[in-house]
Image (spheres, coloured by chain):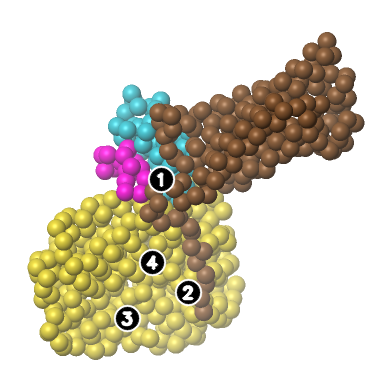
């Protein structure tokens, strides 16, 4: 499933040490986690500058503060659903370092006064987590943890879908009446955190915010897990500090198998960027291309593969992954995918690109979740990064046709 | 400064079109009959002169998909 | 006086049935999301609602006058408990049943913002049960059972509702036939 490497110069943190998932090795390496109260937790998170590693990149301390403000007994949920097909970093983390994740979950739960905690993971990871939980026992887990198995679907990891699934309902996004931080599982203020974020918290509590900030950039501190796949020799999960050069990430995954055409960063709801090795993987570095590190997905597209064909394929997949609840998404995404398919197949007609943009604007913001918006973001970045291909396709040509690796 | 806005519960909306009729200044139907905000906002602001029409739309929506919220 | 109550009772009964048939047809029209007779959609929606409320008033007149009419021999609980009446209990019972269903339909509709769309929709489907029961009741209960004019009125009511129902199930009913139906995918866990 994964190999684990690190770019030169960045020490491994989350992925450091033996990756057996055993409790004794974990305690031997990291020791028992400290206990933090609510104030200490917020301060540590704020000083460290930890942001969510599930894709949105929201400052974690603000999420905790919002839950505390609600003033009622909260609930914590660790989200390891990872519905994104091109991502396997959460699965790797749960297999290799489940105790860091569970430490983080306990730290957060105890600090904010939660009496119950949940962990929401795929079926495979659920077995690893159940084993880890029984090894730990009440001593390490005073707040009881319930494991909920997440369906293998793209939208199953969306925050309101997570709350629904953990509450025993189908894993479908819901209409947002109130913020989850105010009312989530069972109406209680709920803190939903990606499993990687919790693992970082477990280390910050032990080593301090200063240590966390010694990697990454001043604005985007710390390390993150990237899933590098596509035209690389050794696809797998890599740990790096924010600001890492794109080329270094790709080299850490064995280097490119051939010249690269473009890279999809952040996943199927992310953005296409040109394959420039010097590109810094950070919000700041990727912003000019309408992309961001997201949940750390890096997908390398080789020369010889048509970016528009790949985009149309992904759009078709995303259309099929609609939860089926909202009219604009259920109707609009398939139409968008078909239109992109026409463009990818060089079935040019007047107004084709305008139609893509019209449909993109039509589905944006009109749904219970951000599935259409994320899809549109990826498509718009494709139209920009593959501008030359668009022009060629409209003229009936493909720039990648006849170019083989 | 919060303003009264029209919120659509998209999991309930069935594109029946009463709201687009009652609030033509704010809404129009898309290719499939679902309401689109003319302003491009996800939750269009409801000006004072349209408040009662908006309340009627919320009341009459057959799918109970509309709500007025303060944001 | 008793005669007056009896005739008033029967008259309001017939009018109620006619109104109920119109309400069902209007309900189907409202569901289609189309404009009708030059009326915008929300007006069709309101017309359906107002006709239903009028039908309830007529129905109340029907029930109350017959309650006070000694010939009908109605007791208190015959008004809501079906099939225990003294006079032609089966056909009367159908009327009571239809009345109960009407009460449920109207009460849930007036309270639908409190009950939520799902509950409301579930109960509202009973309209398709209520109307034929009311029709059967109208055909057999009164002493007009054999009269030709009542039969004609009832036939016209039936024709109206059946035509509307046929339209309801036809492909021409959908205003946006190309629309992909919304159906929440219950995402199964996979191993």
| Dot 2: chain letter | A
Residue C180 spot, x, y in % from top left: 41, 56
Q: Which residue is mark 3?
A: A237
Where C162 sits versus A394, above or below?
Answer: above
The residues bearing labels 3 and 2 have C-alpha atoms spaced at a distance of 17 Å
User: Which residue lies under the disc numbered 2?
Assistant: A122
Q: Which residue is mark 1?
A: C175
Chain C: its colour in the image is brown
The magenta region covers B27-43
Q: For mark 3, give the secondary structure.
A: strand
- How many numbered marks have been drawn onto this rendered protein structure? 4
Q: Gap in Å between the C-alphas at discs 4 and 1? A: 25 Å
Q: Which mark is residue A320?
A: 4
Local crowd at mark 4 within 10 Å, few (<14), some, or many (≥20)? some
Q: Is residue A382 left or right of residue A27?
A: left
Left or right of C104, for residue C66: right
Residue lying at 49% horizontally and 80% vertically, measured from the top left: A124
Cα distance between the residues tagged 3 and 4: 27 Å
* Image hue for chain B: cyan
Of callouts 3 and 4, the N-terminal one: 3
């Amino acid at each position: 499933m994964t190999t684990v490497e690190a770019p030169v110069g960045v020490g491994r943190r989350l992925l450091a040490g033996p990756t057996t998932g055993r409790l004794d090795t974990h305690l031997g390496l990291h020791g028992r986690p400290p206990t933090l109260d609510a104030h200490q937790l917020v301060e540590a998170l704020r000083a460290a500058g930890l942001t969510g590693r599930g894709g949105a990149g929201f400052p974690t301390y603000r999420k905790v503060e919002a839950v505390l403000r609600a003033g009622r007994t909260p609930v914590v949920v660790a989200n390891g659903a990872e519905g994104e097909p091109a991502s396997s970093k959460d699965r790797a983390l749960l297999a290799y370092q489940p105790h860091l994740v569970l430490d983080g979950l306990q730290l957060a739960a105890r600090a904010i006064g939660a009496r119950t905690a949940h962990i929401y993971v795929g079926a495979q990871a659920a077995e690893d987590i159940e084993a880890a939980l029984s090894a730990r026992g009440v001593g390490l887990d005073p707040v009881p943890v319930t494991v909920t198995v997440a369906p293998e679907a793209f939208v199953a990891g969306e925050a309101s879908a997570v709350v629904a699934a953990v509450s025993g309902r189908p894993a479908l996004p819901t209409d947002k009446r109130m913020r989850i931080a105010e009312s989530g599982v069972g109406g209680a203020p709920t803190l939903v955190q990606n499993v990687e974020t919790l693992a970082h918290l477990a280390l910050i509590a032990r080593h301090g915010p200063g240590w966390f900030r010694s990697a990454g950039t001043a604005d985007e501190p710390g390390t993150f897990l990237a899933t590098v796949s596509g035209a690389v020799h050794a696809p797998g999960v890599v740990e790096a500090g924010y600001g890492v050069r794109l080329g270094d990430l790709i080299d850490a995954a064995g280097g490119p198998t051939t010249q690269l055409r473009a890279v999809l960063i952040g996943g199927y709801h992310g953005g296409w960027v040109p394959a420039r090795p010097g590109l810094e993987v950070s919000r700041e570095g990727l912003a000019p291309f309408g992309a961001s590190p997201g949940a750390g997905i890096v997908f390398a597209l080789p020369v010889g593969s048509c970016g528009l064909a790949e985009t149309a394929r992904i759009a078709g997949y995303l259309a099929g992954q609609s939860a089926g609840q909202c009219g604009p998404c259920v109707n609009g995404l398939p139409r968008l995918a078909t239109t992109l398919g026409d463009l990818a197949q060089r079935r040019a007609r007047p107004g084709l690109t305008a139609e893509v943009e019209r449909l993109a604007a039509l589905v944006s913001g009109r749904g219970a979740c951000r599935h259409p918006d994320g899809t549109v973001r990826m498509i718009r970045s494709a139209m920009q990064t593959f501008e030359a291909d668009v022009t060629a396709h409209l003229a009936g040509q493909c720039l990648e046709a006849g170019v083989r690796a | 400064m919060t303003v009264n806005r029209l919120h659509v519960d998209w999991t309930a909306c069935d594109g029946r079109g009463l709201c687009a009729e009652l609030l033509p200044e704010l809404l129009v139907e898309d290719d499939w009959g679902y309401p689109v905000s003319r302003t491009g906002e996800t939750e269009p602001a409801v000006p004072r002169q349209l408040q009662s029409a908006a309340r009627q739309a919320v009341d009459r929506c057959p799918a109970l998909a509309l709500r007025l919220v303060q944001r | 006086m008793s005669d007056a109550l009896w005739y008033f009772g029967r008259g309001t009964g017939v009018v109620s049935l006619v109104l109920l048939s119109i309400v069902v047809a209007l309900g189907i029209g409202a569901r289609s999301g189309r404009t009708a007779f030059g009326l915008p959609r929300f007006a069709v929606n309101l017309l359906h609602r107002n006709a239903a409320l009028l039908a309830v008033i007529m129905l109340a007149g029907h029930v109350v006058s017959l309650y006070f009419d000694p010939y009908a021999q109605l007791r208190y609980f015959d008004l809501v408990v079906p099939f225990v009446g003294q006079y032609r209990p089966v056909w009367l019972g159908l009327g009571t049943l239809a009345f109960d269903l009407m009460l449920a339909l109207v009460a849930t509709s007036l309270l639908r913002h409190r009950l939520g769309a799902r509950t409301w929709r579930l109960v509202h489907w009973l309209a398709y049960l209520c109307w034929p029961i009311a029709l059967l009741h109208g055909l057999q209960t009164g002493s007009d059972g054999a009269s030709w004019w009542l039969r004609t009125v009832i036939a016209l009511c039936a024709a109206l509702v059946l035509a509307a129902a046929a339209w309801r199930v036809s492909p021409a009913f959908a205003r946006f036939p190309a629309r992909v139906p919304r159906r929440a995918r219950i995402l199964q866990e996979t191993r």
